[in-house]
Image: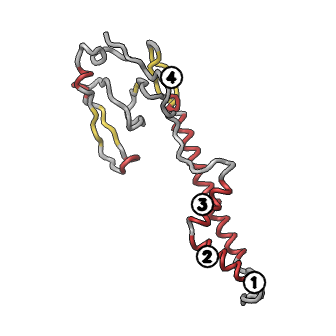
């Protein structure tokens, strides 16, 4: 009988998905500086033009930065768009993190969420078209020869064709103790 220790040291990153760029408290400074000023050189140029316009000696507008109000309007619209996109990312992250999955705990499978999955956990995937992480190792499959698990990696590489995973040869060995057993 082989003993397998699952995730005993705990020095791994969590499985929580975070694709959003900002939090509620750092959106304004990060977006304003990184996206609006450094990311869009035209905005920086028009801010410099408005500074020169405010100098009465060199300005043709009499020292009034008339370009500043339209520039602020454009920046605010762009920031609102960025905030909406980031809010959608937060919602998508929440859905991915709270998706149900069965994790093997002790002697049975228990219902958990994706953010609870740790390195070394055994997960059970039973439904067709279920999303799973790309970095899993298939240790059992109900198909003949353990080769009926097709994965689609369009989120990683844009390809929509199925790539088939099969159980490694060592796991198919009856002496190893996994393949051939009913894991339901």
Label disc, if present, on residue 175 of the rendered structure: none
Q: Is mark 3 in CB contact (under 8 Å) with mark 4?
A: no
Left or right of 1 on screen, residue 119: right
Under tag 2, what secondary structure?
helix
Q: Quadrant of residue 49?
A: bottom right
Mark found first going from the N terminus, 3 or 4: 3
Q: Which residue is mark 1?
A: 55
Determine the CA span between mark 3 and mark 4: 41 Å
Q: Is residue 44 or residue 158 the one in the foreground? A: 44
Left or right of 87 in this view: 170: left
Query: What colour scheme governs how the chains and residues are painted in the rendered image of this protein?
Result: secondary structure
Q: Nearer the viewer, residue 162 or 157?
A: 157
Give the percent coordinates (x, y) of residue 172: 24, 21
Q: Local crowd at mark 1 within 10 Å, few (<14), some, or many (≥20)? A: some
Q: Nearer the viewer, residue 30 or 155?
A: 30
**Percent from the top left, x then y, of residue 160?**
33, 47
- Residue at which label 2 appears: 45
């Amino acid at each position: 009988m082989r003993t397998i220790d699952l995730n005993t040291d705990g020095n791994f990153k969590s499985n929580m998905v975070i694709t959003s760029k900002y939090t509620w408290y750092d959106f304004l400074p990060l977006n304003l500086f990184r996206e609006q000023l450094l990311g869009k050189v035209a905005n920086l140029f028009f801010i410099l033009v408005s500074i020169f316009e405010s100098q009465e000696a060199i300005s043709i507008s009499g020292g009034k930065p008339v370009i500043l109000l339209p520039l602020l309007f454009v920046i605010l619209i762009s920031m609102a768009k960025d905030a909406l996109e980031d809010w959608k990312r937060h919602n998508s992250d929440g859905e991915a993190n709270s998706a149900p999955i069965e994790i093997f705990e002790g002697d049975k499978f228990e219902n958990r969420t994706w953010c609870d999955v740790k390195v070394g956990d055994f997960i059970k995937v039973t439904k067709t078209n279920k999303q799973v992480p790309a970095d899993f190792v298939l240790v059992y499959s109900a198909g003949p020869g353990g080769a009926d698990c097709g994965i689609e990696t369009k989120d990683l590489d844009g390809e929509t064709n199925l790539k088939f995973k099969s159980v490694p040869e060592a796991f198919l060995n009856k002496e190893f103790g996994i393949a051939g057993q009913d894991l339901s």
